[in-house]
Image: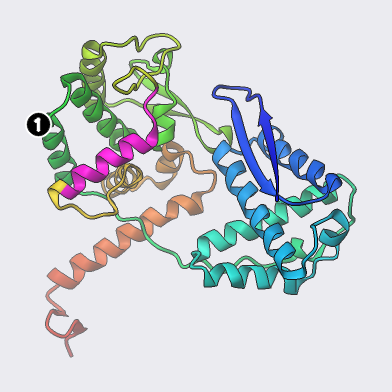
């Protein structure tokens, strides 16, 4: 195996570093690096997506090398047939990968072949019309308002610095009150915080404005007043105990501890707070288009999942309360 270290200077901090552990010829290696750079700087894919796609294609190359006992080259990649990538996906499925991950892996490989077409390296390839594996549709499980209040109460009694308690509660309210992704919230610097709206850059650099609710403003003011570190200007808004920018893994671990102490569902994560925001807003307003803009979804079909969730909840209420519903047999009365 050849270790190739490719470092990009990001257009915005922090710098990007991707460690590629792949065995390939020089020509293919150069094209592979160019594709990753194109994903990041031309297609504006997130760092996380680039890293995931990197690993996905590397997985295929390693499978191809092991199966045919050859060093992957551009010529061998051009000769890849449908049976090759289908065997790879079948192998990945046997290893326990989810349908969603399998679909992403195929999308990554198709993206690389599309890059070769765009560069004029190849004219076409059958993988470009390959169908993605079917992904079972699962509905998000939002946290209840009571669960969020229980977590707030627990945070206030944690054995830690008082300013950390204020920070944790402020971030909890921000995620729930604004429907932010955890990485979106932690990317804010002091200068990004205003009294009315937050300028959020989500997936693919997509911009949206998110209103700030009064309880969130009040809690943020308490946190920033009590924080011993500078949270103004270009300094990070949310910091850890050493003054560095708070990272998602740290806060996710804290939420995991809180929910276990309270006996709350294991799927109550920082991202579940975003689902909770969308679900509760839809229940109160029914404005699907407005929620799409708030969450920064590119397609309304993505936001539609919350309407489906709301319909399921409505049906449960119907089953429990409607006078024509037989609660013992769960069948309609004759």
- Badge 1 crowding class, 10 Å Cα cut-off, few under 14, some 14 to 19, many 20 or more, is few
Q: Quadrant of residue 235?
A: top left
> Which is the main secondary structure of the residues drawn in magenta?
helix
Is residue 122 shown above or below 239? Answer: below
Instruction: Name the residue nearer the viewer: 126 or 279.
Output: 126
Q: Residue at x 62, y 65 (%)?
A: 132
Residue 311 pos. (x, y %): 31, 62
Is residue 199 shown above or below 18? Answer: above
Residue 161 pos. (x, y %): 17, 21
Describe residue 44's horizontal placement relative to residue 170 as left or right.
right
Describe residue 216's horizontal placement relative to residue 155 as left or right.
right
Instruction: Name the residue nearer the viewer: 1 or 17.
Output: 1
Query: Magenta includes 254?
Result: yes
Tell me, yes or no, if residue 147 can be seen here. yes
Q: Residue at x 33, y 59 (%)?
A: 309
Residue 90 pos. (x, y %): 60, 73
Tell me, yes or no, if residue 179 can be seen here. no
Q: Quadrant of residue 323?
A: bottom left
Mark 1 secondary-structure assignment: loop
Quarter of the picture containing the C terminus is bottom left
Query: Magenta includes 13?
Result: no
Range of residues picked out in magenta: 245-260
Residue on which disc 1 sits: 157
Q: Residue at x 16, y 35 (%)?
A: 152
Residue sitting farthest toward the front = 1
Q: Quadrant of residue 298?
A: top right
Describe residue 298's horizontal placement relative to residue 278 as left or right.
right
Instruction: Name the residue nearer the viewer: 234 or 51.
Output: 51
């Amino acid at each position: 195996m050849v270790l190739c270290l490719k470092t990009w200077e990001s257009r915005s901090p922090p710098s990007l570093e991707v460690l590629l552990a792949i065995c390939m010829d020089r020509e293919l290696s150069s094209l592979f690096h160019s594709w990753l750079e194109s994903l990041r700087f031309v297609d504006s894919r997130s760092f996380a997506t680039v890293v995931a796609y990197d690993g996905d294609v590397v997985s295929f190359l390693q499978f191809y090398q092991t199966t045919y006992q050859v060093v992957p080259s551009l010529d061998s990649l051009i000769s890849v047939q449908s049976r090759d990538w289908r065997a790879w996906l079948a192998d990945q499925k046997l290893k326990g990968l989810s349908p969603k991950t399998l679909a992403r892996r195929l999308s990554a490989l198709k993206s690389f072949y599309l890059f070769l077409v765009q560069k004029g390296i190849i004219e076409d390839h059958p993988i470009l019309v390959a169908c993605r594996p079917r992904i079972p549709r699962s509905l998000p499980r939002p946290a209840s308002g009571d669960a969020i209040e229980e977590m707030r109460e627990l945070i206030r009694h944690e054995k830690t610095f008082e300013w950390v308690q204020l920070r944790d509660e402020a971030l909890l309210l921000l995620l729930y009150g604004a429907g932010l992704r955890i990485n979106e919230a932690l990317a804010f610097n002091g200068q990004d915080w205003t009294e009315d709206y937050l300028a959020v850059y989500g997936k693919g650099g997509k911009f949206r404005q998110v209103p700030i609710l009064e309880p969130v403003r009040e809690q943020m003011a308490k946190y920033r007043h009590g924080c011993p570190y500078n949270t103004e200007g270009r300094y990070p808004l949310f910091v850890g105990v050493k003054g560095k920018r708070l990272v998602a893994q740290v806060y996710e671990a804290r939420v995991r501890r809180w929910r276990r102490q309270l006996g709350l569902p294991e799927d109550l994560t920082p991202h579940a707070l975003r689902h909770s925001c969308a679900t509760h807003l839809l229940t109160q307003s029914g404005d699907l288009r407005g929620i799409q803009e708030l969450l920064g979804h590119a397609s309304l079909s993505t936001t539609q999942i919350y309407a489906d969730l709301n319909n399921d909840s409505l049906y449960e209420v119907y089953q429990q309360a409607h006078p024509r519903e037989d609660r013992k047999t769960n069948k309609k009365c004759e």
